[in-house]
Amino acid sequence: MYVGSDYVDLAAWQAWVDYPVEVAGGRGALKAWLGFDGMRITELTLDLALAEVAARLAPDLPRLELESMQGRIGVREVRRAADLLDLVGRHDVRYEGFARGVALRTRSGTRFRRPISRSAGIPTSTAARRAAS
């Protein structure tokens, strides 16, 4: 599914969207692609061009204050097929996050001169702990 807008206010959307992090600001353009398995979201890709971004990525971290943020970020569920010893049909599930072409500028003027391009995996147990906190 695709959803996009040339103007969003992320703080105002909190009435309808349950963000996984604390969001206090962010205005600009947003395009989102969602992948589903039945009624479950298994993939999310965001193209962002935002200004005045303010977010706390974890309760024990300081608030991230950005003048601007642009690029593509996302997360997807990755399932490894069951092996022969898996007699109960369980799968090893993890989440893989990525950031491509991300450029950041802090409110104090610090810029990342080269766009950030990274991928990382999050084991299921870690993702579950983060979701529970």
Image: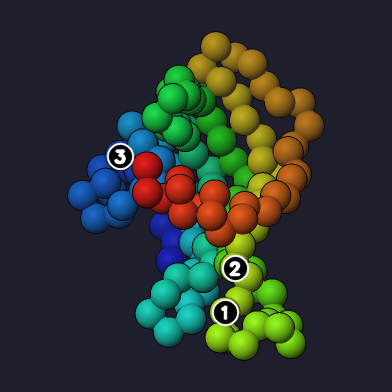
Q: Which of 101 and 40 is in front in this view?
A: 40
Please give the residue where the numbered disc 1 appears in the rendered image. 90
Q: Which image quadrant is residue 89 in? A: bottom right
Name the residue at 67% across, 21% down: 111
- Name above or below for residue 20 compared with residue 26: below
Query: What quarter of the picture does the C terminus occupy?
Result: top left
Quadrant of the image occupied by residue 91: bottom right
Which residue appears at 40% of the width and 36% of the height? 26
Q: Please provide percent x and percent y for residue 67.
A: 51, 25
The residue depicted at 30 percent of the width and 54 percent of the height is 17
Name the residue that disc number 3 marks: 11
- Spot occupied by residue 24 in the image (x, y as percentages of width and height): 33, 32
Q: In this view, does 75 lie above or below 50?
A: below
Amino acid on which the number 2 mark rests in the picture = Val
Residue 90 coordinates in the image, percent (x, y): 57, 79
Left or right position of 122 against 39: right
Residue lying at the far top in this picture: please name it. Answer: 108
Residue for badge 2: 93
Numbered tag placed on residue 126 in the rendering: none
- Disc on the earlier residue, 3 or 2: 3
- Label 3: which secondary element: loop
Q: In this orientation, does residue 61 appear?
A: yes
The amino acid on which the numbered mark 3 sits, given as a three-letter code, is Ala
Q: Amino acid type of disc 1?
A: Arg
Viewer-side label of 3, 2 = 2
Badge 2 marks a residue whose secondary structure is strand
Foreground pick, 52 / 93:
93
Q: Which of marks 1 and 3 is nearer the N terminus?
A: 3
